[in-house]
Amino acid sequence: MPESKTSTDTTNPMADPAARLALTDTIPNVPGVSKPDPILVVDNVVRQFGGMTAVNVDHLEVQRGLITALIGPNGAGKTTFFNLITGFDRPTSAKSRFGSSEGAASWAFDGRQLGRTSASAVSKAGMVRTFQLTKSLNRMTVLENMMLGARGQSGENLLTCWLKPTWLGQEKVIEDKAKELLSRFKLLRKKDDYAGSLSGGQRKLLEMARALMTDPTMIMLDEPMAGVNPALTQSLLGHIQALRDDGMTVLFVEHDMHMVRHISDWVIVMAEGRIIAEGRAHEVMADTAVIDAYLGAHHDTDLSDDSLLEDMPGAERMHRKAEAHEEEVARKGAAATKEKNQ
Ligand SMILES: Nc1ncnc2c1ncn2[C@@H]1O[C@H](COP(=O)(O)OP(=O)(O)OP(=O)(O)O)[C@@H](O)[C@H]1O
Ligand SMILES: [Mg+2]
């Protein structure tokens, strides 16, 4: 069985770099700009935690068939935005913001309104996501985790799905598919190990492989490279490009600017919950608003300078950051609940 997938689908026009450049050439570098063929269209999505506005997106479109990066400083609202769009969280209601239902949040995926849709229904509609903090089930094997992935978004009714009789007839087909994907992500020899025994990077790979079990139309990856061994980084980049070349739309959050520049066709920048810039990677990284958002007062620093990024997250640093982030989110969540209950 091949260990990596390098084939490209020549029937997909977006597999051709020149076609992608020609397409992005037609899109002005304006935050919230319309796209020629958007697969995701988002309007008025706001999420507040207590008095703090984490996400405040007036309008955003994601072009079908491209790799789009969503970048922004820590706390910009990227993960919260993913949670909202994929049904893992709900926007703050328009009513509580404006005192009327005007400007209500709405978003459509592939022409279908998803505003009140559950996470598992979003996944069935073809939009799947991975998590910044991985959600593999540690006491199940790698292969079992994969097979559960065939039934929808992780974390949703997985055990009941496992017991459904309809599952049994399909088991062999699903297992073959799981093994093929594990092989692609170099995890096949780990198939009988507990997911809990994998390294942080391997768990990231498992989560991505599992997301692909549902044959999504669009995959949303939240920091797919965080903690991944540098030896695997290159092949993971290749996998993501191969998904795009096979016709999938990819939206990913990433802090590693090497990766952003290397694989994204389009970049969207978020800061303090808002979309502040869009464009191709090199254009966006030269944008003063983007440099300001990332670097505060250090105006003399150039985001397109690779040497600046040499010390961008190593596995250990990302792990610590994820832990600190988790603690902060828990602390804020507790504070918001306390405030609400008072
Ligand atoms: N459940 C929650 N309760 C309270 N505050 C939250 C919650 N989730 C997120 N926040 C806050 O909302 C803001 C946006 O957080 P979010 O995790 O979306 O940022 P991010 O852009 O993904 O950051 P990072 O790059 O560090 O992952 C932060 O200030 C965060 O602390
Ligand atoms: Mg995040």
Image: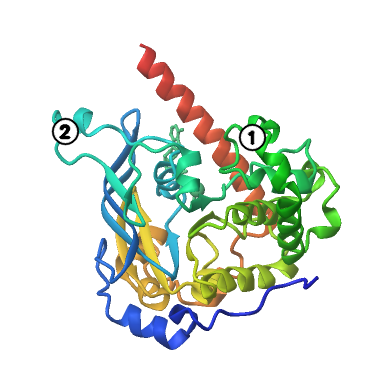
The picture quadrant where one finds residue 1 is: bottom right
Q: Position of residue 73 (x, y in %)?
A: 44, 54
Mark 2: which secondary structure?
loop
State whether residue 113 is above or below residue 24.
Answer: above
Q: Is residue 212 something that shows in the picture?
A: yes
| Observer-nearest of 126 and 88 | 126
Mark 1 and mark 2 lie on one chain; the one further toward the N terminus is 2
Would residue 202 be found to the left or right of residue 252 on screen? right
The quadrant the C terminus occupies is top left
- The residue where tag 2 is placed is 101
User: Tag 1, which secondary structure?
Assistant: helix
How many numbered marks does the figure carry? 2
Above-or-below relation of 50 to 282: above
Residue at position x 65%, y 67% in the image: 236
- In the foreground, 7 or 57: 7
Tell me the kind of residue under disc 2: Ser
Nearest to viewer (mark 1 / mark 2):
1
Question: Is the C-beta separation of discs 1 and 2 under 8 Å?
Answer: no
In the drawing, does residue 333 fall left or right of residue 201? Answer: left
Task: Give how far across and how far down residue 193 sits, in percent.
Answer: 85, 46
Tell me the amino acid under the disc marked 1. Cys
Q: Which residue is drawn at 16% across and 33% down?
A: 101
User: Dot 2, crowdedness within 10 Å: few (<14), some or many (≥20)?
Assistant: few
